[in-house]
Amino acid sequence: MKKDLLDIICCPVCKEDLILKINKLEGEEIVEGTLECVKCHNKYPIEEGIPNLLPPE
Ligand SMILES: [Zn+2]
């Protein structure tokens, strides 16, 4: 995913902003990382460039 996507996506639980933590970057593409909600602190993984924004059980 690109960093710009952060402007569009939000926490699926509470719709708040997400904090990006990058583990692996290729050019402008974030390949692996974590998105953490500023409010509920749920974490969503980024794997193979795709953010997994499914709400946790
Ligand atoms: Zn949240």
Image (tube, rainbow, N blue to C red):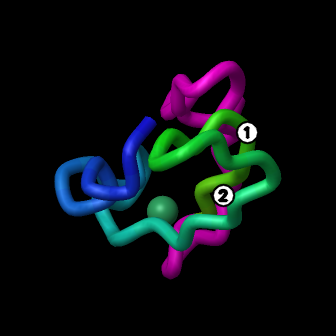
Residue at point 50%, 40% (across, down):
29
Name the kind of residue labelled 2 in the image: Asn
- Residue 51: x and y in percent read 53, 32
Q: Nearer the viewer, residue 4 or 28?
A: 28
Q: Is residue 29 above or below residue 18?
A: above
**Residue 3 in the image: above or below residue 47:** below
Majority SS type along the magenta span: loop
SS for callout 1:
strand
Tell me the SS state at disc 2. Answer: loop
What label does residue 42 carry, if any? Answer: 2
Residue 57 x/y as whole percent: 70, 30
Mark 2: C-beta under 8 Å from nearest atom of ligand 1 = yes
Of 2 and 53, the residue lying toward us: 2
In the image, which residues are magenta?
Answer: 37-57
Q: Which residue is mark 1?
A: 32
In the picture provided, is 12 more to the left or to the right than 57? left
